[in-house]
Amino acid sequence: MTDIAVFGGKPIFDKPLNWFDIWPPVTQNGEKALLDLYRSRQWSAFFPHERVFAEQFARHHQSKHGVFMANGTVTLQCALKALDVGPGDEVIVPALTWCATATAVHYLGATPVFVDIDAESLCLDPALVEAAITPRTRAIIPVHLYGAMADMPALLAIARRHDLRIVEDCAHMHGGLLDGRSAGSMGDVGSFSFQHSKTMASAEGGICITNDDAIAERIFRLSHIGYGPNQQQGAATEAPPPGMVCYPFRATAFQALILQDQLTTLNDRLVRYGQAVEYLEERLSRTTAVRFQKRAANTDRQGYFGWAMIFDHPDYRAISMPRIKEALVAEGVTVLPTWGPVYDYILFNLPRELYRIPAPCDVAHGVSPRMLWLIHPYLGLAAEEIEKIAEAIERVCGQIHRLVG
Ligand SMILES: Cc1ncc(COP(=O)(O)O)c(C=O)c1O
């Protein structure tokens, strides 16, 4: 038996995987579009580029309207505000997500209410949602996390029964299809992020999509200083509705053109990611005791922000996760830990009295420290590289007991 790299053996990868070297995609079409845009001086919302992209993205996701914005946090804020969420209201969010899902609720003066995740999908557990509903509950934000979609049929049924609104946080789920329905098109509003690490990336950026004309108009005004969708910048002809305070949360034409280029290859990329995940999971389920985030059976096309591995098998429980991570990284497989339950995350700085945890979130607490994930650009690597990733994980798992202590 040769030593694993952390004990001095030769690493599987000569050069560690580094997603910054391969992501975001750089193409000839993108280069030309950006140069032409630069020369045209049509960089902002005085011109049509942002709207054209927003329409294309919305159409791709089975939605009538898209409002392109500065990031995937203000998209959540504007979506909630457009649905009239405000002070005194409660919004149910999953215990495991990026902190923005919850802070967006707080920005509106409402209370985030944390509900546990499902142990397999790692998304909001619908079976626990109803018990967290109070007369103050206004909305639910399911998050389609890493590489699985939330149980939307169950959550939509709960929302209907209790007259609640749904904002889908799709920051991780560009292009996902569940039961033939696109991520972001099932709830009242879908919110996406285009931050540098995401499956479509323009450094920063976000979009809200919806099929509701009135909600779309409100979101547009909220993020465009109050202008209505048909008003020319600099020539406002009517005020936003009374009391609706609006901000400039716009993105730029440069981002729009980068994303337009990426949208043309999104589906092909997701197919490649899916093939890599299928190969890795089929092989590693036979050769290791690692388990994987489970995709819903009714998934027609899976989006991937990342591929999540969970090391909670009894054989692995005595091994510290920092040691497992260290061993994988030593082989060149650059895995990342997850954030843990939002309310324990270092950047979530909300005073305790401003959020609710109606029941202990045991699954989020149990799973998140035992999880490591691989960011999506690696899933697009050539078959030989995917093979090496599998080999590295097998190698580390094969000697995992040497990592004790
Ligand atoms: C689940 C989730 N929601 C929302 C966001 C916020 O997106 P942004 O960083 O574009 O504000 C992120 C970003 O990482 C996220 O992961």
Image: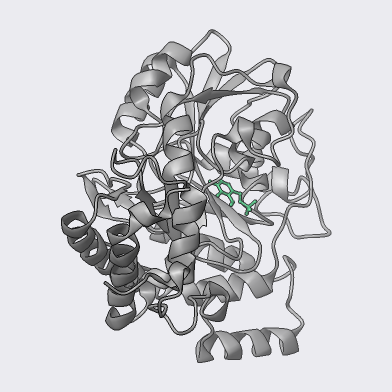
Residue 214 in the image, given as x and y percentages of width and height: 56, 37
Residue 203 lies in quadrant: bottom right
374 is higher (above) or lower (below) than 30 = above
Horizontal side of 203 relative to 64 (left or right) equals right
Residue 354 falls in which quadrant of the image?
A: top right
144 relative to 285, above or below = above
Q: Quadrant of the N terminus?
A: bottom left
Point out residue 392 in the picture as x, y percentages from the top left corner. 34, 69
Identity of the residue drawn at 59% across and 89% down: 31
Q: Nearer the viewer, residue 78 or 125?
A: 125
Task: Identify the residue at horizontal 28%, vertical 64% (top origin).
Answer: 394
Q: Residue at x 37, y 40 (%)?
A: 317
**Front-most of 51 and 131?**
131
Give the residue at x 29% y 71%: 391
Give the percent coordinates (x, y) of residue 10. Answer: 41, 80
**Total number of numbered labels?**
0
Q: Which residue, as the protein is rendered here, is positioned at the far left? A: 286
